[in-house]
């Protein structure tokens, strides 16, 4: 049975989509079957994997609307063991359409049930809001990863997210828990980064992942090439950190830490990049 993990933060630009793509990629490279669900109308997970949103035949909107069968909803990606249910702009209207529906909070949960036996992990990229779409994500998930950028006001507004998670747990999904807190966009040259890390660890304690994702030019460039960092620049610092994060994540689920590091070199068909023998940023 798949473990369903939601990536949530009502703030935009915190590295949520980057983490969904790259953590999912390294877990897939370890041999686990991973399904990414793009539930953000912006569709950045979809485009970040090199998929043209304008040419989609079906998307997550069609799945929750009952317009397609589960088997028609998923797409292959450039990574073995990694599949995607893409998003489209049609999802923008779903929040309005669902308001009048009975049991409107569980449309995504019901749509994902046919996939649970086919995957080890299902990662959901949620929109940067706390509206009905995000409530659907929280109702469908077993746990939540909260990405937090190491910047000023990083923890501002998190109390609202935690309250929402607690409310969903109390009323709609009693099994929901916080999987972990992921610190992103760290710049260790500044005192601010150290302060945010300390504040996050004080508030969330052991829920904060040991692995911290740094600011990285390569991580920023990779979506423009439609590639996860493992295929775009696997020797970069960002790639190394996401691989380490995958090891840490899997170890929490009883998978040996060495699984990811011993995985085969990812495919690079059609990829043009400078070959380097050292860590790049």
Image: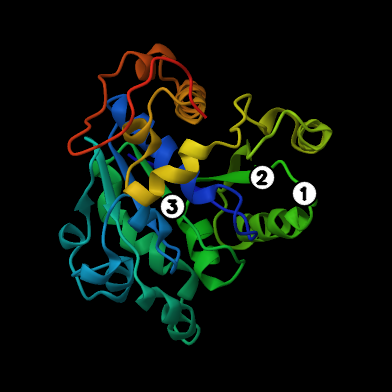
Q: Which mark is residue 148?
A: 2
Q: Position of residue 236 (x, y in %)?
A: 46, 26
Whether residues under marks 2 and 1 lie with C-beta atoms below 8 angstroms apart, the answer is yes
Q: Position of residue 230 (x, y in %)?
A: 36, 31
Total marks shown come to 3
Residue 171 location, quadrant: bottom right
Whether residues under marks 1 and 3 lie with C-beta atoms below 8 angstroms apart, the answer is no
Residue at 67 percent across and 32 percent down: it is: 208
Residue at 48 percent across and 39 percent down: it is: 219
Q: Position of residue 98 (x, y in %)?
A: 45, 81
Q: Quadrant of the N terminus?
A: top left
Nearer to us of marks 1 and 3 is 1
Where 200 sits versus 125, above or below?
above
Q: Which mark is residue 229?
A: none
**Residue receiving disc 3:** 124
Q: Is residue 131 left or right of residue 220?
A: right
Which callout, 1 or 3, points at the residue further toward the start of the chain?
3
**Residue receiving disc 1:** 155
Residue 267 location, quadrant: top left
């Amino acid at each position: 049975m798949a473990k369903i993990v939601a990536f949530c933060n009502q703030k935009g630009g915190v590295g949520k989509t980057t983490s969904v793509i790259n953590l999912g990629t390294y877990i897939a490279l370890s041999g686990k079957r991973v399904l990414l669900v793009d539930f953000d109308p912006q569709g950045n997970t979809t485009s970040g994997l090199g998929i043209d949103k304008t040419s989609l035949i079906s998307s997550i909107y069609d799945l929750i609307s009952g317009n397609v069968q589960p088997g028609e909803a998923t797409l292959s990606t450039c990574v073995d063991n990694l599949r995607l249910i893409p998003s489209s702009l049609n999802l923008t209207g779903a929040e309005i359409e669902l308001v009048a529906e009975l049991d409107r909070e569980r449309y995504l949960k019901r749509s994902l049930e046919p996939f649970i036996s086919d995957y080890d992990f299902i990662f959901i990229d949620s929109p940067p809001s706390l509206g009905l779409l995000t409530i659907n994500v929280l109702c469908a998930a077993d746990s939540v990863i909260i990405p937090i950028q190491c910047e000023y006001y990083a923890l501002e507004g998190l109390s609202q997210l935690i309250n929402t998670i607690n409310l969903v747990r109390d009323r709609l999904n009693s099994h929901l828990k916080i999987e972990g807190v992921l610190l992103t966009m760290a710049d260790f040259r500044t005192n601010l980064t150290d302060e945010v890390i300390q504040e996050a660890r004080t508030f969330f304690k052991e829920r904060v992942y040991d692995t911290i994702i740094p600011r990285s030019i390569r991580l920023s460039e990779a979506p423009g090439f439609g590639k996860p960092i493992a295929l775009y620049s696997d020797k970069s610092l960002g790639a190394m950190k996401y691989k380490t994060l995958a090891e840490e994540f899997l170890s929490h689920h009883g998978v040996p830490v060495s699984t990811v590091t011993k995985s085969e070199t990812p495919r690079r068909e059609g990829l043009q990049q400078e070959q380097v023998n050292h860590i790049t940023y």
